[in-house]
Amino acid sequence: MTFTCRPPAEPEVLVDNDKVKVTRWNFSDGAETGWHRHGWDYVVVPLADGKLLAELPDGTSSEAVLTQHVPYFRAEGIEHNIINASGKPYAFIEIEIKP
């Protein structure tokens, strides 16, 4: 794991019930979520075109180019730190699917 001093992304929980948790993640340029593990399957809906960097536990990282309103799915168990590499503020909606 890489540890650096970046501004934190700001989560805004929009819905949290027994079925789903919907969070809008707001990132300033270079902001990060911090290390976390997903306990539920989830869908991300980008609110703009952008680029995110995922730091992974093995010390590697991967870059993802995201397209506005084109969602993607990930299974539970993923551990990572997400960093806004868009060069501008960025936001997405995360929909976590509860069992």
Image (spheres, rainbow, N blue to C red):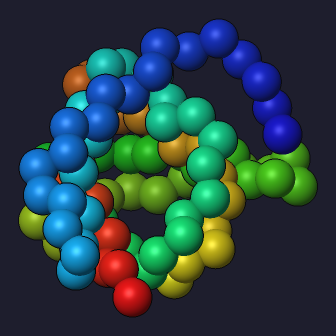
Is residue 33 shown above or below 30? below
- In the image, taking residue 95 as reference, residue 53 lies left or right, namely right
Quarter occupied by residue 98: bottom left
- The one nearer the camera, 22 or 51, is 22
User: Residue pushed farthest front?
Assistant: 18
Residue nearest the viewer, comparing 95 with 55: 95
Q: Where is residue 39? Give x, y as percent.
A: 54, 70
Q: How many marks?
A: 0
Q: Is 73 in front, or is 13?
A: 13
Relative to 8, 60 lies left or right: right
Query: In the rendered image, is residue 76 in sight?
Result: yes
Q: Residue at x 71, y 17 (%)?
A: 4
Q: In the displayed structure, would residue 70 be above or below residue 35?
A: below
The quarter of the displayed image where residue 35 is located: top right
Instruction: List x then y, in percent, for residue 29.
Output: 36, 20
Across and down, in percent, residue 77 comes to: 64, 74
In this view, 6 is above or below 78: above
- Locate residue 2 relative to residue 55 in the image: left or right: right
| Residue in view at x 74 percent, y 53 percent | 56
Image coords of residue 1 (percent x, y): 84, 40
Q: Is residue 87 visible?
A: no
The quadrant the C terminus occupies is bottom left
Identity of the residue drawn at 45% across and 21% down: 8
Q: Residue at x 63, y 68 (%)?
A: 78
Single out the residue that lies furthest toward the right. Answer: 58
Which quadrant of the structure image shows residue 67?
bottom left
Front residue of 74 and 23: 23
